């Protein structure tokens, strides 16, 4: 079983701040971490490998600094790490990212692809499903439990008010919730090994045969951020208390009329 | 000269920090108050390789080095000095004796389970009447055929409450004194070995520290480490390395207390502003941080010298002397900055102040450190 986990290196948002002038994330001095949902994906991949055998390959698209995220994944126990990195890939939106990662995954090979549900910096939850579309394989998002059964995967998918238990033919892609599995720590020896191992780097030239250059990078991205701004915090609102039901109705109606809502 | 940590060391430091903040910090106060180490925490530390950091993978260790081990000692001791000493005695004292002086067979049999996280070790040198004067030993090992029969008692044996493997020292001929001191590996379940309840203490109260009594404990001669009469050398060499661990523990205690104080002074308001706004507070913190950093650099120097197979014993003694004094001064200063709240058990700095004291005493007192240091200065 070849399990491939896609991870993203993100700023630790517990500490992140927005530049009040440009409204962009201040990344200087902000520690980078593996996105929480992705880390949970790593954990489940490692557990599945230990149950059914095989290998776990971790893939990260990002700048060279993302190397440390891959070393961390290796130190948790992954077998192989691949950094997808190149200037041509910079500025990619979710579609372009999935196009590139799809090409990388075709090159690497896979039986099961696991991604996190969404990244804490972009919050789109799009890249996982888009990769599945790129690869033309079935997908199950919001996985809370995963089991392997022969050449199928049984996935418990979380919905707002219910669960779905789905049986999916391999190869397929699942997106993991951070509830899926509490990730293990790296081990000391794992870190030593991680830095003795090679991280494979896939650049544009390595992937160009399977990539349409018009659909990658900033210029190939169908979506662009036109503006970002910090929302004004909402005020606490007005509290009306000590009213009977009739008085409350009247008070609310008066407010609605006053604001020309009705 | 390069003072920056390698990428691998930085990631190891990150692991130690995350683990200590998430797993050790929430338990530290309770473990101190109940005077009980949390065995689930111990198992987790074993699982992630904290008990075999500077030892070769070949024997089941993490394959890292002494510098990484000091980073571990600092990070865990920032949250809980008891965890620091538990790891340190196991690693620097027990395992190093077997690693440095054991036969291949002894290493496979005893070192591997200790450093791969299956077993815990302890080290018994100090006796009720032989502390700094290790030559005052009374415990004897009498040869009997292929065995030795050990009789005597050891006091303040850290980890002995739950350790599986005891490295201990006994005289094969009392008349010869330390010249006959010999090191042995004794397994916990050997008949005649008994471990007392924990000795009630002022600090590092979560650590296990007991009296170990040997009443005609029979061990095969194959459990002797090195040769007969080599024990004193083995014991002293282990303590040289151990001092690096204690220095790093001291740095951790000090930095941990300082971090608490920094948090507090930003929140605590007096005279209409946070006390961090007062220059006295700022200068106090600046002085303390500078001293901690000096102690840290001395500790790293000793660790790097050990990793480079240079003579490090004086560096280690200097690092321990400095760092342990810094730990005491800084924790006292931090309790002072927190004022009445610092004196309460609601804040961890009072525990850190109590924990700091022992660093000036164990694995060689500050006075013994001065003997080691002055001995290297060609004064006589």
Image (cartoon, rainbow, N blue to C red):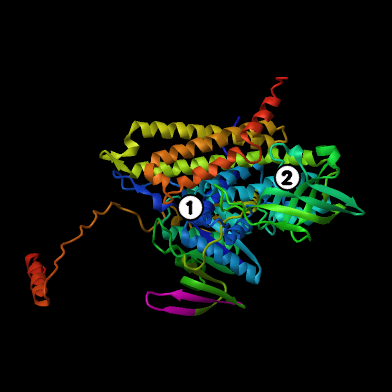
Asked whether B9 falls inside the magenta stretch, the response is: no
Please tell me whether residue B221 is drawn above or below residue B306 in the rendered image: below
Q: Is residue A257 left or right of residue A19?
A: left
> Can residue B307 be seen at all in this image of the molecule?
no
- Quadrant of the rendering where the C terminus of chain A is positioned: bottom left
What is the residue that sits farthest to the right in this orientation? B145
Q: Residues within 10 Å of mark 1 (few under 14, many from 20)?
A: some
Q: Residues within 10 Å of mark 2 (few under 14, many from 20)?
A: many
- B159, B196: nearer the viewer: B196
Residue A16 x, y percent position in the rendering: 38, 49
Residue at image coords 51%, 49%: B79
> Can residue B366 be seen at all in this image of the molecule?
yes
Residue marked by disc 1: A33
Quadrant of res B233: top right
- Quadrant of the rendering where the N terminus of chain A is positioned: bottom right
Please tell me whether residue A186 is drawn above or below residue B375 in the rendered image: below
Tell me, for residue B125, which label it has, or none.
2
Asked whether A152 falls inside the magenta stretch, the response is: yes
Residue A241 x, y percent position in the rendering: 14, 68
Please tell me whether residue A183 is drawn above or below residue A191 in the rendered image: below
Q: Is residue B92 left or right of residue B21?
A: right
Residue A217 x, y percent position in the rendering: 44, 53
């Amino acid at each position: 079983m070849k399990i491939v986990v896609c991870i993203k290196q993100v700023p630790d948002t517990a500490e992140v701040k927005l530049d009040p002038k440009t409204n962009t994330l201040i990344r200087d001095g902000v520690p980078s971490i593996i996105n929480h949902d992705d880390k949970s994906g790593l954990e489940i991949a490692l557990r599945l490998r230990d149950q059914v055998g095989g290998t776990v390959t971790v893939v990260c698209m990002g700048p060279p600094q993302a190397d440390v995220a891959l070393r961390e994944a290796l130190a948790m126990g992954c077998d192989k790490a691949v950094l997808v990195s190149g200037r041509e890939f910079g500025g990619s939106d979710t579609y372009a990212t999935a196009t590139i990662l799809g090409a990388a995954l075709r090159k690497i090979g896979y039986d099961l692809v696991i991604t996190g549900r969404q990244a804490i910096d972009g919050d789109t939850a799009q890249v996982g499903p888009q990769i599945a579309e790129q690869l033309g394989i079935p997908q199950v998002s919001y996985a809370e439990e995963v089991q392997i059964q022969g050449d199928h995967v049984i996935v418990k998918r979380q919905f707002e008010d219910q669960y779905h238990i789905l049986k999916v033919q391999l190869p397929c892609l699942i997106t993991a919730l951070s509830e899926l599995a509490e990730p293990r720590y790296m081990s000391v020896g794992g870190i030593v090994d991680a830095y003795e191992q090679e991280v494979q780097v896939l650049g544009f030239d390595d992937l160009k045969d399977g990539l349409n250059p018009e659909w990658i990078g900033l210029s190939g991205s169908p979506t662009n951020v036109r503006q970002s701004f910090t929302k004004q915090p909402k005020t606490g609102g007005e509290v009306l208390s000590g009213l009977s039901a009739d008085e409350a109705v009247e008070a609310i109606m008066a407010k609605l009329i006053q604001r020309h809502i009705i | 000269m390069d003072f920056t940590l390698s990428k691998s060391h930085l990631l190891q430091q990150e692991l130690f920090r995350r683990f200590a903040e998430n797993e050790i910090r929430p338990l530290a106060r309770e473990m101190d108050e109940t005077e009980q180490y949390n065995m689930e925490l111990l198992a987790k530390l074993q699982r992630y390789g904290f008990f075999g950091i500077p030892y070769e993978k070949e024997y089941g260790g993490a394959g890292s080095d002494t510098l990484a081990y000091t980073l571990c000692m600092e990070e865990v001791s920032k949250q809980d000095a008891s965890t620091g000493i538990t790891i340190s005695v196991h690693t620097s004292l027990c395992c190093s004796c077997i690693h440095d002086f054991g036969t291949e067979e002894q290493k496979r049999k005893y070192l591997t389970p200790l450093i791969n996280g299956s077993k815990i070790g302890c080290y018994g040198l100090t006796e009720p009447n032989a502390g700094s004067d290790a030559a005052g030993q009374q415990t004897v090992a009498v040869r009997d055929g292929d065995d030795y029969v050990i009789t005597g008692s050891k006091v303040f044996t850290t980890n002995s409450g739950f350790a599986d493997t005891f490295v201990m020292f006994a005289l094969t001929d009392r008349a010869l004194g330390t010249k006959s001191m010999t090191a042995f590996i004794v397994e916990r379940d050997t008949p005649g070995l008994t471990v007392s309840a924990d000795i009630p203490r002022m600090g590092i109260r979560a650590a296990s520290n007991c009296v170990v009594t040997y009443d005609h404990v029979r061990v095969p001669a194959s459990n002797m480490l090195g040769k007969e009469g080599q024990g004193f050398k083995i014991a002293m060499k282990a303590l040289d390395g151990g001092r690096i661990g204690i220095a790093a523990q001291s740095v951790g205690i000090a930095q941990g207390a300082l971090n608490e104080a920094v948090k507090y002074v930003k929140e605590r308001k007096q005279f209409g502003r946070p006390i961090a706004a007062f220059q006295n507070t700022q200068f106090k913190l600046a002085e303390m941080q500078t001293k901690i950093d000096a102690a840290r650099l001395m500790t790293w120097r000793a660790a790097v010298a050990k990793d480079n197979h240079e003579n490090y014993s004086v560096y280690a003694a200097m690092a321990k002397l400095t760092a342990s004094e810094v730990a005491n001064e800084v924790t006292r200063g931090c309790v002072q900055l927190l004022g009445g709240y610092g004196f309460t058990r609601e804040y961890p700095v009072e525990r850190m102040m109590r924990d700091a004291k022992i660093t000036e005493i164990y694995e060689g007192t500050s006075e013994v450190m001065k003997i080691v240091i002055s001995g290297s200065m060609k004064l006589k």
